[in-house]
Image: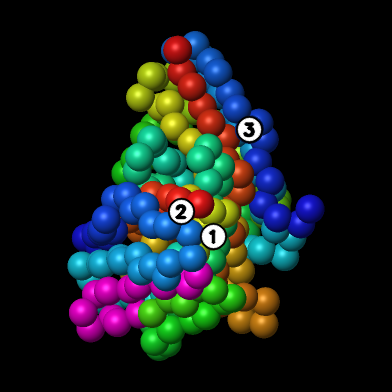
Amino acid sequence: KQEVTQIPAALSVPEGENLVLNCSFTDSAIYNLQWFRQDPGKGLTSLLLIQSSQREQTSGRLNASLDKSSGRSTLYIAASQPGDSATYLCAVRTDFGNEKLTFGTGTRLTIIP
Amino acid sequence: DTGVSQDPRHKITKRGQNVTFRCDPISEHNRLYWYRQTLGQGPEFLTYFQNEAQLEKSRLLSDRFSAERPKGSFSTLEIQRTEQGDSAMYLCASSTNLVRLAGHEQYFGPGTRLTVT
């Protein structure tokens, strides 16, 4: 059974700093991995999707990496802004025939102005 | 807005009542998913459709839950005889397996928050 863990559960950093969020998964036979952002009481916004054959994806100030063999992904946020404050969730799709995403519990990020 | 939409956004009901939620996926997306999220947790998979066929159901989906996607477009999720433990955010997502459109990325709606009193 796939299990996804995100550490830390909460993180506070001053505005302008670069930061890294971590995601680990127990079954390395994944099809893809997605990073999402969730604002309080809202739905999920997809940030980045990494296919199992890829090592990283970039979008603006965000960079996500994937190391399948070690069961890890990181989300790097450059030059953090107060608007980046949210909960960040990672989710894995285990294999091609299995459509469901398995989510971690998220990291609640607070950027201090 | 061409994103995933859900209705209603909030629902308060008394224990024992039936409730129904609706999800409209992104047009051209042939896959539709339902997830449930409780406070402080990540979403948990409930079920998914490819076109009108329900292809996978989680063990979380008890007999009181039923989902349909009759014409392969919008979907409904019904909960019968609601219990307090059903209180959660119900999230809908859609995707496509047509490579030219997207790489199986799931796009989520705003969710329906259910409170059972």
The percent position of residue A33, horizontal first and vertical second, equals 41, 71
The residue segment tinted magenta is A66-79
Q: What amino acid is labelled 2 in the image?
A: Ile
Q: Residues within 10 Å of mark 3 (few under 14, many from 20)?
A: some
Q: Which mark is residue A111?
A: 2
Question: Is the C-beta separation of discs 1 and 2 under 8 Å?
Answer: yes
The percent position of residue A54, horizontal first and vertical second, equals 42, 87
Question: Is the C-beta separation of discs 3 and 2 under 8 Å?
Answer: no
In the shown orientation, is residue B100 left or right of residue A32?
Answer: right
Which residue lies at the image location 48% right of the left edge and 72% below the top edge? Answer: A78
Secondary structure of residue under mark 3: loop
Which residue lies at the image location 27% right of the left edge and 55% below the top edge? Answer: A8
Q: Nearer the viewer, mark 3 or mark 2?
A: 2
State which quarter of the image contains the C terminus of chain B: top left
Q: Identify the residue position indicated by label 3 in the image.
A: B9
Q: Disc 1 or 2, which lies upstream in sequence?
A: 1
Q: Is residue A90 above or below residue B115?
A: below
Pick whichever, B114 or B32, lies toward us.
Answer: B114
